[in-house]
């Protein structure tokens, strides 16, 4: 749009310059014929003296087709025009330069009618339009060069001014992109202006403050509820175990104890995630941990089950971390696979190739697997896929969320990948060889 506007303005400018200069030439020629006509009325044709003019206008005094007097440059030239306006009236036109011995030029022609008592009937003046044409050509050339340059200047100025105006918006966007649910204490920069951008930043900071307060209250509730539930759960367990030992046999005792165990696991998982949210994740003193030994222990534990076949390919895999936390990662990963398997599990581990070292482990099952769209969502809290929503499977929907929190706290990565050995799900966990930045060996 800017380019079109500039091109249109340049075209109008060229036309106006040409028209203005041509009008100036016409006015000059008109002035010249008025001067000669005034002299003619006073002195007559016989006393008329036609000299040169500063503006280069050439004059003929005519009667019919007869040239009665003329400028020196038109001596011997025939009448330049057949126009015959009435006395005191003017008419204009153009003649080719060849008629005045200036081929290639165009001349403006002005004819003024005079009374017959002067001995003539009209006075003619011609003046070259070369100046007007040259001026118009010059403006055209300047516009051809200046408009693109001006367009570039306008584009650069617009880019700079818009960039400067939007710089606070980009700062707000960049800061907002870095703010995560784990830390809502950050605020977006607020410019010291009193415009809409400052109002936007103020509104976003107020919103972040409300979110921070809401999340803090939610985390405090989860943590408090978890701690408060431990005492009544322990009391129920104790009373039920006592009743089972001293009272008559009752199948309800085993049902209650099973549900109490589920409640204890759920409360423990909630407290683990609450601690992670508060930046106090369950990562204690770190040391070298053999992941293959943890998997071997799980394989031995599960082989006691007659309904489950557990195989493994365990190579040495050492990670740097909290032994208890990494054991919980392995236990949760294996328990998740057991709940969804149809009877087979496969455990693998090994060192990570490359100069950076590290270790990895994988847990596979022969269950329904995890669809690609769900492979990230399944790590959310209380997320249970359609196949795992049965209450009797023993899962709370927090196991994988805890796995991810602990793995991330150790600087590692966890994800579901395509199956390799068994046709179901494959959970892959990687740990770095060195401790995360800021940790001490």
Image: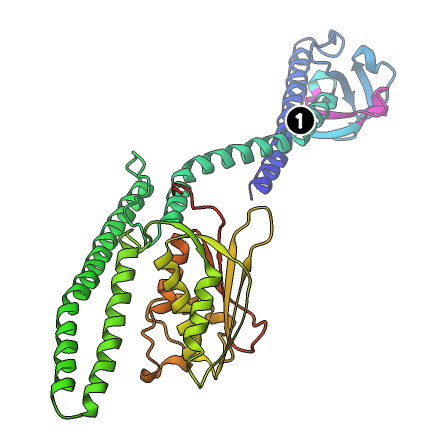
Name the side, left or right, on which 222 lies relative to 174: left
Q: Quadrant of the N terminus?
A: top right
Q: Nearer the viewer, residue 204 or 401?
A: 401
Question: Is 365 left or right of 225, judged from the image as shown?
Answer: right
On the image, the x and y values in percent for residue 290 come to: 46, 57
Residue at horizontal 13%, vertical 81%?
242
SS assignment at label 1: helix
Q: Position of residue 429 (x, y in %)?
A: 48, 61
Q: Please provide percent x and percent y for residue 287.
A: 40, 49
Note whether residue 267 is visible. yes
In this rendered view, identify the residue nearer to me: 234 or 157.
234
Q: Is residue 282 left or right of residue 436?
A: left
Say if 281 sits above or below 385 in the image: above
Query: Which residue position is annotated with label 1?
Result: 142
Q: Find residue 83 and report its image quarter.
A: top right
Measuring 84% from the left and 25% from the top, which residue is drawn there?
104
Q: Is residue 192 above or below residue 313?
A: above
Magenta stretch, residue numbers: 96-116
Q: Position of residue 328 (x, y in %)?
A: 36, 64
**Residue 383, image quadrant:** bottom left
What colour scheme governs how the chains and residues are painted in the rendered image of this protein?
A: rainbow
Crowding at dot 1, Cα within 10 Å, few <14 / some 14-19 / many 20+, comes out as few
Q: Is residue 85 at all visible to an observer of this figure?
A: no
| Nearest to the observer: residue 183 or residue 394 | 394
Q: Is residue 308 magenta?
A: no
Q: Which quadrant holds the C terminus?
A: top left
Task: Check the image and report above or below for 290 versus 235.
Answer: above
- Residue furthest toward the right? 76
User: Is-magenta flag for residue 103?
Assistant: yes
């Amino acid at each position: 749009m800017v380019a079109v506007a500039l091109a249109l303005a340049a075209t109008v400018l060229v036309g106006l310059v040409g028209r203005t200069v041509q009008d100036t030439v016409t006015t000059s020629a008109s002035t010249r014929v008025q001067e000669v006509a005034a002299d003619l009325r006073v002195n007559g044709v016989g006393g008329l003296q036609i000299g040169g003019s500063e503006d280069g206008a050439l004059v003929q005094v005519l009667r019919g087709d007869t040239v009665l007097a003329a400028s020196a440059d038109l001596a011997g030239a025939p009448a330049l025009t057949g126009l015959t306006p009435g006395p005191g009236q003017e008419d204009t036109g153009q003649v080719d330069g060849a008629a005045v011995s200036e081929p290639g030029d165009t001349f403006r022609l002005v004819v003024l009618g005079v009374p017959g008592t002067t001995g003539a009937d009209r006075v003619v003046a011609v003046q070259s339009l070369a100046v007007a044409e040259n001026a118009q050509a010059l403006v055209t050339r300047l516009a051809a060069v200046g408009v693109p340059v001006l367009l570039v200047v306008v584009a650069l100025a617009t880019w700079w001014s818009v960039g400067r105006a939007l710089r606070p918006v980009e700062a707000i966007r960049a800061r907002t992109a870095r703010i995560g649910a784990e830390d809502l204490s950050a605020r977006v920069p607020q410019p010291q202006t009193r415009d809409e951008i400052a109002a936007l930043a103020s509104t976003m900071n107020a919103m972040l403050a409300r979110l921070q307060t809401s999340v803090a209250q939610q985390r405090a509730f989860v943590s408090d509820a978890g701690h408060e539930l431990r005492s009544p759960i322990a009391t129920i367990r104790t009373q039920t175990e006592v009743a089972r030992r001293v009272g008559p046999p009752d199948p309800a005792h085993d049902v209650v104890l099973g549900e109490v165990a589920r409640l204890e696991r759920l409360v423990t998982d909630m407290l683990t995630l609450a601690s992670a949210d508060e930046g106090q994740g369950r990562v204690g003193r770190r040391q070298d941990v053999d992941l293959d030994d943890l998997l071997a222990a799980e394989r031995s534990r599960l082989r006691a089950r007659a309904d489950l076949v557990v195989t493994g390919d365990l190579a040495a895999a050492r990670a740097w971390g909290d032994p208890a936390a990494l054991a919980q990662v392995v236990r949760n990963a294996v328990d998740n696979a057991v709940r969804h398997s149809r009877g087979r599990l496969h455990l693998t581990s090994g060192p990570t190739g490359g100069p950076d070292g590290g270790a990895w482990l994988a847990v596979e099952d022969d269950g329904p697997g995890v669809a690609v769209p769900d492979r990230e969502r399944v790590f959310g809290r209380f997320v249970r896929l359609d196949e795992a929503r049965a209450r009797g499977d023993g899962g709370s929907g927090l196991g994988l969320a805890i796995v991810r929190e602990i793995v991330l706290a150790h600087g590692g990565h966890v994800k579901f990948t395509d199956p390799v050995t068994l046709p179901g799900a494959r959970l892959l966990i990687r740990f770095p060889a060195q401790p995360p930045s800021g940790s001490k060996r």
